[in-house]
């Protein structure tokens, strides 16, 4: 609680009640470069045979393929969702970074069962002229109670006892926007929401729909199939109006939701797939962007599988076969199975990158920034390799039979070889771990209730500045079969210029070397071996404390 109060103090949330909501203040424009840098530093380079960074000279044609290339997931669903003040998309960022290169862009497959929300950048608020829409709350007589600009087409409102989800008296929501000169031809629109909905284009009603009865917020968050319709557009601006007569879903909270989906592609799924593979075959290099979305990564429900949604694995295999010079970028926040991974020349894990995602992807792919992240999770080769296959209650009880053997500890105990290990992550330079020594008083520090320190000598043996994370893992005490075979005991980061060496101190946590008993945390008397390296499965150095 004290940490939360400190945070509230720093952001001004404890100021007078009249103070403006912190959430209504967009980040200052001058922070965008810093956000961009931090986003790039969070990316994890899982695999690279030297194709990255992409060369800036000589490349004439790049195929940008995949659902995350067209509509990436910037954030997860539920309470993780925020309305961004600006969004950087990969296509625009990659084109801007290499203006002389011919880019072909193909989705190839979809990452969602439902349509993507209408793209904000393709619309204009008819009142403010800004990208987005004009939203009005109407009373039963059609009078406007409240009006506001919106920068999203996936909207939700929550209410709590004494705090209604919608403005008092609101019986209808009216959303208006202008779809700017859309591509002529067939377009698909869809509606999803809690209540009765009506969509009009240029004054003509093209779709009416009503949501099914939902038992509570969990059912709404799972999101049943949306209601689609297909229309032919002539390539001129289109006035869009959407009405929602809300049916409030009530459980512990009130919940209202409204999503306007849009798919501008006139191709069938098979045609889209074939076009992407053909484009890959004709290109000198491919950037293939796959991923998940808030349909499968959100709160209140679990993922049904570790596979990427839709036909993305099939697309990856076909694209890599068509063009081996393929760099795969995965836009997801939790581990997925990647049966094609070892055939890709490079594999970059980008999580849900936030509003500066596109520019950060371009920075890393072209080498203007180094991916600095390391895995905080383990990627299995197959679903059967996961140490905890499920967490399903039996007869109302959930038994944690795995004990401490979760994550990398479980893989180590089972002897399973992961696809990518906990702590793993590459950069754009090379490193040598030269030596490791424990401080003379390391054991005394531990027995005295303090952390210990080891010193690791490291050399940047590559040709550019880089960042490395030195990790130390402790062996379990002999005879303690309930403990994990190894456990992270400390880590430290270092940044060095090409050719430079440094001695880096790694603090070894006394808590990580201890076991919890009925008497509290206890440090075993036996000395412990510490294995040092760049990941939990690459540990070339050893010291004893």
Image (spheres, helix red, strand yellow):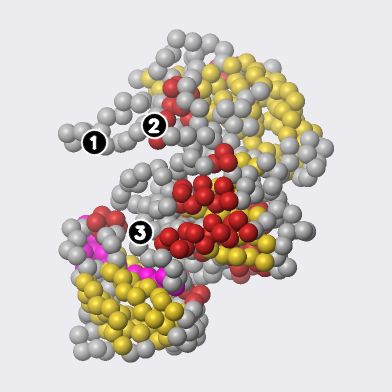
Query: Which quarter of the figure has residue 92?
Result: bottom right
How many C-alpha atoms fall within 10 Å of the one at disc 2: few (<14), some, or many (≥20)? few
Q: Could you tell whether 30 is left or right of 86 in the image?
A: right
First-in-chain label (3 vs 1): 3
Q: Position of residue 192 (x, y in %)?
A: 29, 68
Q: Which residues are magenta?
A: 248-264
Q: Real-space Cα distance between discs 2 and 3?
A: 25 Å
Q: Real-space Cα distance between discs 1 and 2?
A: 19 Å
Q: Magenta span has 250?
A: yes
Q: Could you tell whether 130 is left or right of 160 in the image?
A: right
Q: Position of residue 496 (x, y in %)?
A: 76, 41
Residue in view at x 51 percent, y 22 percent: 486
As drawn, the residue found furthest toward the right would be 499
Residue in view at x 41 percent, y 65 percent: 268
Q: Could you tell whether 545 is left or right of 317 in the image?
A: right
Q: Position of residue 399 (x, y in %)?
A: 27, 29
> Which residue corresponds to mark 1?
393
Q: Could you tell whether 510 is left or right of 284 in the image?
A: left
Query: Dots 3 and 1: beta carbons under 8 Å?
Result: no
First-in-chain label (1 vs 2): 2
Query: Which quarter of the figure has residue 222?
Result: bottom left
Residue in view at x 24 percent, y 88 percent: 142
- Disc tally is 3
Label 3 SS? loop
Q: Quadrant of the C terminus?
A: top right
Query: Which quarter of the figure has residue 197?
Result: bottom left
Q: Magenta span has 359?
A: no
Q: Position of residue 469 (x, y in %)?
A: 64, 37
Asked if residue 49 is positioned above or below residue 129 in the image, the reply reads: above
Query: Where residue 113 is drawn, which disc sits there?
Result: 3
> Which residue corresponds to mark 2?
384
Whether residue 22 is visible, yes or no, is: no
């Amino acid at each position: 609680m004290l940490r939360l109060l400190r945070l509230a103090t720093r952001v001004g949330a404890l100021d007078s009640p009249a103070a403006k909501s912190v959430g209504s203040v967009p980040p200052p424009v001058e922070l965008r470069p810093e956000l961009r840098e931090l986003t790039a530093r969070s990316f994890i380079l899982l695999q690279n045979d030297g194709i990255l960074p992409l060369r800036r000279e000589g490349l004439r044609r790049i195929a940008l393929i995949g659902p995350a290339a067209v509509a990436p997931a910037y954030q997860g669903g539920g309470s993780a969702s925020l309305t961004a003040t600006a969004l950087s998309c990969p296509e625009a960022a990659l084109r801007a970074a290499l203006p002389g290169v011919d880019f072909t862009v193909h989705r190839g497959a979809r990452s969602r069962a439902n349509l993507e929300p209408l793209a904000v950048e393709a619309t204009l608020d008819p009142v403010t002229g800004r990208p987005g829409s004009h939203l009005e709350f109407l009373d039963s007589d059609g009078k406007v109670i409240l009006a506001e600009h919106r920068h999203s087409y996936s909207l939700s409102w929550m209410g709590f006892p004494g705090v209604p989800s919608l403005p008092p008296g609101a019986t209808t929501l009216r959303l208006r926007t202008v779809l700017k000169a859309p591509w002529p031809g067939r377009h698909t629109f869809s509606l999803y929401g809690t209540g009765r909905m009506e969509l009009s284009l240029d004054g003509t009603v093209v779709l009416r729909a009503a949501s099914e009865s939902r038992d509570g917020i969990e059912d709404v968050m799972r999101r049943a199939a949306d209601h689609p319709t297909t229309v032919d557009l002539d390539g001129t601006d289109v006035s869009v109006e959407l009405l929602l007569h809300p049916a409030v879903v009530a459980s512990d909270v009130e919940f209202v939701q409204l999503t306007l989906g849009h798919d501008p592609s006139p191709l069938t799924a098979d045609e889209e797939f074939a076009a992407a593979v053909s484009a890959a075959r004709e290109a000198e290099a491919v950037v293939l962007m796959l991923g998940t979305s808030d349909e499968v990564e959100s709160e209140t429900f679990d993922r049904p599988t570790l596979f990427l949604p839709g036909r993305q694995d099939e697309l990856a295999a076909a694209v890599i076969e068509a063009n081996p010079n393929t760099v795969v970028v995965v836009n997801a926040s939790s581990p997925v199975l990647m049966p094609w991974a070892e055939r890709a020349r490079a594999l970059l894990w980008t999580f849900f990158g936030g509003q500066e995602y596109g520019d950060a992807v371009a920075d890393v792919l072209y080498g203007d920034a180094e991916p600095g992240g390391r895995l905080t999770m383990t990627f299995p080769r197959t679903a059967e390799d996961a140490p905890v296959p499920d967490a399903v209650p039996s007869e109302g009880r959930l038994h944690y039979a795995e004990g401490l053997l979760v994550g990398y500890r479980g893989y180590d105990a089972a002897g399973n070889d992961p696809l990518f290990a906990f702590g793993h992550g590459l950069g754009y330079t090379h490193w040598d771990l030269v030596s490791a020594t424990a401080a003379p008083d390391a054991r005394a520090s531990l027995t005295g209730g303090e952390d210990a320190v080891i010193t690791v000598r490291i050399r940047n043996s590559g040709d550019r500045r880089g960042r490395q994370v030195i990790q130390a893992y402790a062996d379990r005490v002999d005879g303690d079969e309930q403990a994990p075979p190894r456990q992270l005991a400390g880590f430290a980061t270092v940044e060095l210029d090409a050719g430079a060496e440094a001695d880096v101190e790694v603090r070894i946590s006394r808590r990580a070397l201890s076991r919890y008993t009925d008497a509290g945390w206890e440090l075993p008397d036996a000395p412990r071996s510490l294995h040092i390296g760049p990941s939990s499965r690459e540990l070339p150095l050893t010291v004893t404390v």
